[in-house]
Amino acid sequence: MLGYQELIIIFLIVLLLFGGSKIPDLAKGIGKGIREFNKAKDGIRDAIEKEEPVKQPAKKD
């Protein structure tokens, strides 16, 4: 589990690598990707729920 010190160090490294002006664009891109992923996930779930269940043949004892 990451502690606060590790998170601050990671944030500072990201800030140095990308610069202050690129971080909002990076966050916007990540948010857009997450929204598209969730939309696709929900679409697949809806498609599966709309399908009729396949009837299993009766078991013979």
Image (cartoon, grey):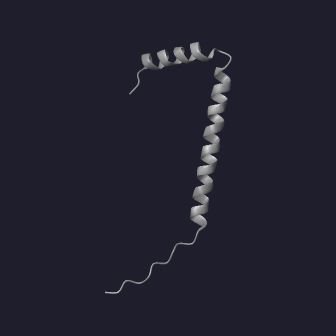
Q: Number of numbered discs present? A: 0
* Residue at the image position 60 percent from the left and 39 percent from the top: 34
Please identify the quarter of the rendering in which residue 16 is found. Answer: top right
- Residue 6 as seen in the image, left or right of residue 40: left
Q: Kindly give the residue lying farthest to the front in the view shown.
A: 17
- Vertical relation: 5 (above or below) 27: above
* Residue at the image position 58 percent from the left and 15 percent from the top: 17
Q: Kindly give the residue lying farthest to the left in the view shown.
A: 61
Please identify the quarter of the rendering in which residue 59 is found. Answer: bottom left
Residue 53, percent across and down? Answer: 53, 72
- Vertical relation: 15 (above or below) 40: above
Residue 19, percent across and down? Answer: 63, 14
Quadrant where the image shows the C terminus: bottom left
Q: Nearer the viewer, residue 39 or 13?
A: 13
Quadrant where the image shows the N terminus: top left
Please identify the quarter of the rendering in which residue 27 is found. Answer: top right
* Residue at the image position 60 percent from the left and 46 percent from the top: 38
Residue 14, percent across and down? Answer: 55, 18
Residue 11, percent across and down? Answer: 53, 18
* Residue at the image position 43 percent from the left and 18 percent from the top: 6
- Residue 4 as seen in the image, left or right of residue 26: left
